[in-house]
Amino acid sequence: MTKKMTIAILGLGSRGLQVYAPIIEQNAEKMELIAVADLMEDKVQEAKERYHLKEENCFSSAEELLLADRVADVMFICTQDQDHVKYAIKAIQKGYHLLLEKPVSPDEEECRLLLKTAQEYQRKVCVCHVLRYTPFYTKIKELLQNGAIGKVMNIQAREDVGFFHQAHSFVRGNWKDSKESSPMILAKCCHDMDILVWLADSGCSRVSSFGELSWFKEENAPKGAGNYCLGGCAAKENCPYDAEKIYITDKETGVRHGAGWPANTFVIHPEEEAVREALKEGPYGRCVYRCNNDVVDHQVVNLQMENGITVTFSMCAFSATCNRTIKIMGTMGQIEGDMGKNMIYYTPFGKETEEIDLTKLTDDFSGHGGGDIRMVQQFCDYIMQGKKSPSITDLAISLESHYIALAAEKSRLDHGRVILLKESV
């Protein structure tokens, strides 16, 4: 019988506890959760009971886990952005291979230090750039590799963050302050920078960017808005960002209608009464105009790739849904894609458009369009069998997206100045 990959999860937030632990359980023939660590005792206890972990393998902090002898083959590091590298280096030195949540770090020097350490200790480190593993982008990559549209000339990509997702994660949540986490273009869109590099099959030479925080500010608060959504906000009825709507009553995101995320990021068992109590004076119940947030709510990036392809990317908070769309133009045709619809439209010049319905090719689009589970499975094959799929996001490959995103932020802060990547990194 093939040995299972054993796993320790460091950080039991929405990714560690709500995404990766269930995926490990679903793939019990190939992998096993052995240990967990988190500062919140209730989350550790929840993981211990749900996954039948030994008491000695349940740790109250990252430091406690990393001081102990190595307990697993790999570690999934799912802590906050600015803690990733310090824990990753210690884990590598302990002998762990790593699956590392993105972004690696908002600091270029830390990124380079981690890569150097991984190479020195000969540890495999993969970054959670899940888009490469999705049926959507995998199919587009296949079309490009097969020369379906000739030589690629231009790529136009857009990420619709979703008004509720922006409010949850980047206004009220853990990624609202770039000084404590990362700039928006890195925290949210290093996924997109990575997929653009992959599809263009090229590094990037030059970057320019514009964007700002325009709406989620004190001066835009409607008349009568309170500090919290529950308990006396006079603007509540007509506010789409109202926390009660987003977390409780909305048909798509509200717990009253069976939604887990986003409320499960701050309540382990998101039942209405518990969620309502957490919103009264907790961070996720704050008025979106009074959150002391600083990350942008809209941004555009222009990329000049080393192979001559030009790329435009737009990220915006103000959309009804969370979605990604793309258009790729080549010398012999074009490809358009809508990830939310799981549809790709391939048009060779002078011929009829072919519609590629991805729902006819697979039925698993859970977790980032089916990317989460495929990433963990392919990571397991890479660690245990040395089987490196074309999608595998090794650290050395993944850091290109970080350098691009950090260059874009540098450009944005300098009024759109063109940044040379060699100058930036």
Image (cartoon, rainbow, N blue to C red):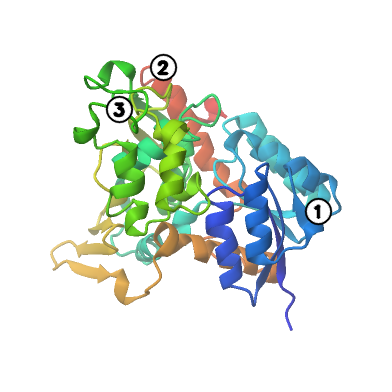
**Viewer-proximal residue among 287 and 354:** 287
Q: Position of residue 301 (x, y in %)?
A: 35, 33
Q: Position of residue 238 (x, y in %)?
A: 19, 34
User: Which part of the image, by quadrant, shows the N terminus?
Assistant: bottom right
**Amino acid found under the numbered disc labelled 3:** Gly
Please, what is the three-letter code of the amino acid marked with disc 2? Answer: Asp
Question: 289 or 402: which is nearer to us?
Answer: 289
The kind of secondary structure element at disc 2 is: loop
Q: Can residue 188 be seen in this view?
A: no
Give, as a three-letter code, the residue at label 1: Gly
- Characterize the local packing of mark 2: few (<14), some (14-19) or many (20 or more) Cα atoms within 10 angstroms: some
Residue at x 42% of width, y 27% of height: 295
- What mark, if any, has residue 232 been given in the picture? 3
- Residue 198 picture location, percent across and down: 45, 52
Say if 222 sits above or below 122 in the image: above
Mark-to-mark CA distance, 1 and 3: 54 Å
| Foreground disc of the pair 1, 2 | 1
Drawn side of residue 244 relative to residue 292, left or right: left
Instruction: Give the mark, 2 or 3, whose residue is nearer the N terminus.
Output: 3
Q: Name the residue under label 1.
A: 95
Q: Residue 258 carries which label?
A: none
In whole angstroms, how far apart are the C-alphas of marks 2 and 3? 41 Å
Give the alpha-carbon distance from disc 1 to disc 2, as whole Å: 42 Å
Instruction: Locate the C terminus by quadrant.
Output: top right
- Could you say which quadrant of the image residue 368 lies in? bottom left
- At which x and y percent is residue 342? 29, 63
SS at circle 3:
loop
Q: Which mark is residue 414?
A: 2
